[in-house]
Image: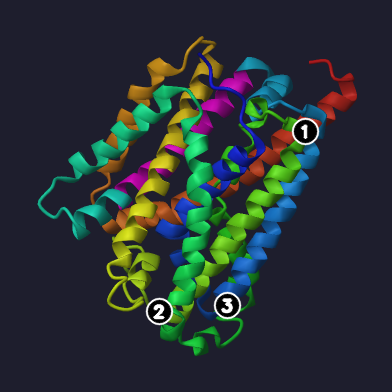
Amino acid sequence: MENPKIGNLEAIAFFVIISINGILLSSSQFLVQQCSSSSLINALFVTIAVIAITFVFCLLLKNFVGNSLLDVSEFLGGKILKFIVGIVFIIYFICRVSFFLRKMSACLQILYYPMTNMIFIASLFCIAAGIIVSLKNNSIFKSAIVLLPILLATIVLVFIGNSKNFHFENIYPILGNGINATFFSGFSNVFAFCGLAYLFFLPSKLRNPEKLTKISIISVILSGIFLLFAVADILFIFGDVLNISELFPIYASVRRIEFGTFFQRLDAIFLLLCTLCFICTLSFNTYLITDILKNITNTSDSKPFIIPCLLIILGFALSIKQNSMLKFLENTFSKILFLILAIMVIFIILVSANIKKKMTGGKS
């Protein structure tokens, strides 16, 4: 039985949870390290840039209401282009979530399970995601709706709780490492909104596909708010000197919060929320990858793809042995792939499809 259509709130939660996962584990830290004291300005700049990009993409999709990127690709270049686009994005999604799986598993191993092999920890994540995806009752999206407001409230509380530890002089000089790092090369930090690469595979799944623009803009704004709070928390506490390869800096900042003797070990609660966020992200990726595979192979059920997909993700995550390699893959390789695929490729496909539709009157 196929998953029912996805509601507006579920789609918003889908986008924001994926972006939040990236912000928590890597992108907020890399943004602060690149832009230094101007990281808040850069975070606001890339948020506005992504809102503009998203609006343009949604405008280009107006002629293809209810069609996913795969459908538009098939209209533009037939089944061959559809297959190529599907495979390329599958590779990107697998790479992206594998990096997060490796980092999340390493973090848990260091903090709570130093005697446990990372294979076991990562396998538990994959098993949980496999069970959730195989349920086929929209449990992924429903759980995201519950988790999203908790995560948004948590980052605000972390910011407030850490306020007495802030060093506000860290915002000087205002332009940090210069105008180029803040606005020009800093534009590449749009990769913090990694959910954008996933969003345009959803229109065919939406209950109200005509609301895609509204869903997209709200999602970007919520992600941008989370990014601003996360970047501010890191900047005001650590500046740009923090370099923790295994423990992500927002978690390190939570360990500094003191609400008295009654509220202790807030870092454990925060890490639990981060773990739940990652399980949602891994489930989202698995769901979308298997759905793309079902679509491009013209099979009736995506269930047979779940286990092979998770095994590939697990194998790729465990193949990353060095922290320096993980850092490069997260900050450089992922960023380049995002800019090429989620910005350039999607834009070219949408523009070309609109041109073809105008020239052919909508006939493929």
Viewer-nearest residue: 169 or 91: 169
* Residue marked by disc 3: 38
Quadrant of the image occupied by residue 223: bottom right
> What amino acid type should be assigned to the residue bearing mark 2?
Phe
Please state if 38 lies on the left or on the right of 101 as rendered. right
Q: Position of residue 192 (x, y in %)?
A: 54, 56
Image mark for residue 113: none
Query: Please, which residue is most extreme toward the front here?
Result: 262
Please tell me which residue is depicted at 71% across the width and 26% down the height of the picture.
67
Check residue 96 for magenta coloring. yes
Query: Which colour style is shown?
Result: rainbow
* Residue marked by disc 1: 210
> What amino acid type should be assigned to the residue bearing mark 3?
Ser
> What amino acid type should be assigned to the residue bearing mark 1?
Glu
Q: Position of residue 311 (x, y in %)?
A: 30, 29
Cα separation between marks 2 and 3:
14 Å
Disc on the earlier residue, 1 or 3: 3
Q: Is there CB contact under 8 Å for labels 1 and 3?
A: no
- For the question of whether residue 186 can be seen, the reply is yes
Label 1 packing within 10 angstroms: few (<14), some (14-19), many (20+): some
Q: Is residue 252 above or below residue 168?
A: above
Q: Position of residue 145 (x, y in %)?
A: 54, 43
The magenta segment = 80-103
Q: Is there CB contact under 8 Å for labels 2 and 3?
A: no
* Residue marked by disc 2: 238
Q: Secondary structure at mark 2?
A: helix
Task: Give the main secondary structure of the magenta stretch.
Answer: helix
Disc on the earlier residue, 2 or 3: 3
